[in-house]
Amino acid sequence: MNTEKKRILVLGGGFGGLAFAKSIDPSLAEVTLVDKQNHHLFQPLLYQVATAGLAAPDIAEPLRTLFSEQEHVQVLMDEVVAIDLEREWVTTPHQSLSYDYLVIALGGQTNYFGNEKWEKHASGLKTLADAHRIRNEVLGAFEMAENLSGDSEERRRLMTTVVIGGGPTGVEMAGTLAELAHRCFRRDFRKIDPKQSRVVLVDAADRVLPMYSEKLSRKAKKQLEELGVEVLTGKKVNDIKSRRVILDDQVIEAENIIWTAGVAANPLTEKLDTPKAKGGRLKVEPDCSLPRFRNAFAVGDIASLEDAKGVPVPGVAPAAIQMAKHVANVIDKEIREGLVVGDERARSPFIYRDKGAMATIGRSRAVASIAGREFSGFFAWFAWLAIHLITLVGMRNRLSVFMKWIYKYVNNKPGARIAWRPSPSKAKPRKKKQEALR
Amino acid sequence: MNTEKKRILVLGGGFGGLAFAKSIDPSLAEVTLVDKQNHHLFQPLLYQVATAGLAAPDIAEPLRTLFSEQEHVQVLMDEVVAIDLEREWVTTPHQSLSYDYLVIALGGQTNYFGNEKWEKHASGLKTLADAHRIRNEVLGAFEMAENLSGDSEERRRLMTTVVIGGGPTGVEMAGTLAELAHRCFRRDFRKIDPKQSRVVLVDAADRVLPMYSEKLSRKAKKQLEELGVEVLTGKKVNDIKSRRVILDDQVIEAENIIWTAGVAANPLTEKLDTPKAKGGRLKVEPDCSLPRFRNAFAVGDIASLEDAKGVPVPGVAPAAIQMAKHVANVIDKEIREGLVVGDERARSPFIYRDKGAMATIGRSRAVASIAGREFSGFFAWFAWLAIHLITLVGMRNRLSVFMKWIYKYVNNKPGARIAWRPSPSKAKPRKKKQEALR
């Protein structure tokens, strides 16, 4: 047995990075976890920050706190600028970090499918900054509409939001926005009628939530429409301009346009000399390692894999967690048994266990597919609540979110409808090498 | 009796504006409340957002929600750009608003006493944007220190914060920052020793909290020092440069500099042809109206008044609320009895009732002066908690803050240690007239 501790470098503090660092045997390895943010973000609830239901600290937990009791894990808030698989080191603006094993868990980013010019007109939803921007702009648009007198075309535009992408994030965004606009705002405004606002959900596919059965997709669509969402499926977005979405057969004028239609791998993958799949994701071997660099692994949204049963592993949190735990087991075994890197005795193939999926569509509405059975309506919604509370990281967050959901359910009003102006530019002159952290 | 409803325009949704709009008789007036933010902000707890104890939505409540049941109050999220006292109207980028009565409750802003060039090096703390900037920069500085190897002078600088101003905000900021740095961070960092961090509180006066007795000031200083704050009283700030505070006898190198030393009136007062006091505050008659414009009133931090007993009314929330209620009574009476504007029968003088003051200095520590009696330590801290919970606006906020304080007390860790990078510039091209809302 090799008694020397191995140096493991984990890039990214999302679901994959966190699960790996929590799973690896502390007696075998020194782990360094690098993330450019100081927190783990519970992505599945990010749309709730954007739609004014939750505050940022409710769905985030400082990475240092998560590992404060684990002496073998060192957290660095720093930005990875280069990965050198040949020389086995990673570069940040502050340091070079060498490794024995590398776990790439950098996740994805919004993908405009080659139309990057759309980005300035249609906000993605991947970070807390995105969520706050969307919240400020949606709340601000209704305030602007209230200030207008007469000009009803502009007022209608201000009260229109287009969500592009009919996956879980798009469906949840659209449902919650419709609820906010049609119900919660009703008593609050005097001059405008929030019921006249529009929330339009656009997707090129012929149904929403294509990963579910057709029956559940139909139910989701029906629930969305009950909330007042206009669901436009089978409509390709031809162009996006300032406050304007251009489809084949119509042009929608909208103050706010939200893009949830695509995810691509972190752009750091571009420079890696290893096979890629669609969206720059890293093709991995059945054990989640890179083909030519068996001491480097990719897990979560940044990895592309058909598992040992031929199932394409989806880009969801449970898959990232399962891959990360699998990789921790592989590395544990390889170190413990003193095997050479890549020894097939340690390299069992990853098998994805689909525990089901669910999406909420506003208060008391959801669709769920659990253990082969399908649910919709209140029960699915309740299950959605429970699962998210259980899996949310941090007891404080669970308590806080639970209380806010009860409060919102009783009052039918989300609690975080606070917009604030962006910080005035207080351009502290910074030394170059510190800039990456800002 | 005059049965026609009067048009009352209230500028500002702080403590004064809110109390006025809540107090005025709904049968006598139509009230329009203008604020450039969509929320009332509970300023006394703003330092808690800056020091990562609370989230923004915990201490803010949407103005529309606060008045959703009051049909006679119309809320406008808009920015006042000019006040014309002669013609009796107020201009915003969107509209002109005429009035029968005007209540100016625009509050104050950070005052650098003529050294506006210090602003870019020393952040004020008046808005949620200020609070988030300070939180991000203080948390970020410790992360940067953790990333450094060797260079201990820079590391010490990164771990140093200077708070300028020994009033309640400065004392509360310094105490909470010291607690955060010396205690909460202790378990979280591996390479730096947070105990080596410095929090320095600087004031030109010879003691902190000069509005309290000398005995309480001494106690506050002692409590601050127990938490590890270096209290430098009697030290004038000669200059502030990038990450450097220059006193008479020393220069302090500090990554973060926070300025809480002065408040000036909203700059809109500059153009008003009416007498001003120090910091541009509007001198008001004993009834809180402006000397030559008796249908215009100023309340709260923007007003300057010695009350009928010769007591200078302090710039604190209870004073703003009391003034606002007094003005509501004056206007109520004038309208109800059909008196001409300024009729002395309606114009009773305002008398300030000092219900005491308190400042917290970290967990379980505070100083308080209530009904002529003075307290310090745990009891004062407990009273501080209770009073702030009672006066916090909104039941949801009270519950949320209460829970977070219990959690923080038990865990000795604040819950909102989440920093996020500023939103990348997503420069949506905007029409000119909408810019004021952004």
Image: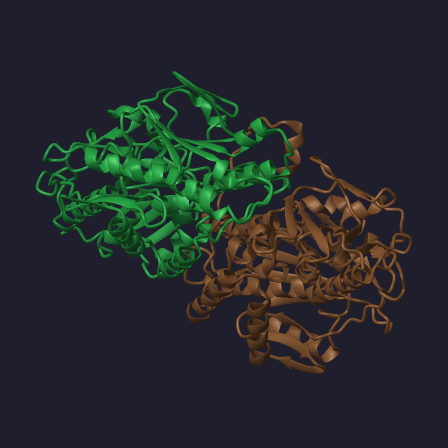
Chain colours: A green, B brown
Q: Quadrant of residue B80?
A: top right
Q: Look at the image and tell me whether residue B253 can be seen.
A: no
The front one of A163 and A375 is A375
The front one of B391 and A9 is B391
The front one of A332 and B122 is B122
Left or right of B290: which side holds A125? Answer: left
Left or right of A356: which side holds B94? Answer: right
Q: Where is residue A160 in the image (x, y as percent from the top left)?
A: 49, 32
Q: Is residue B110 above or below residue B409?
A: above
Q: In which quarter of the image is residue B382?
A: bottom right
Q: Look at the image and tell me whether residue A102 can be seen.
A: yes
Q: Quadrant of the N terminus of chain B?
A: bottom right
Left or right of A88: which side holds A132? Answer: right
Give me the residue at 62% from left, 29% from top. Answer: A151
Q: Where is residue B173 in the image (x, y as percent from the top left)?
A: 61, 61
Q: Where is residue A51 in the image (x, y as percent from the top left)?
A: 45, 44
Q: In this view, does B227 lie above or below A96?
A: below
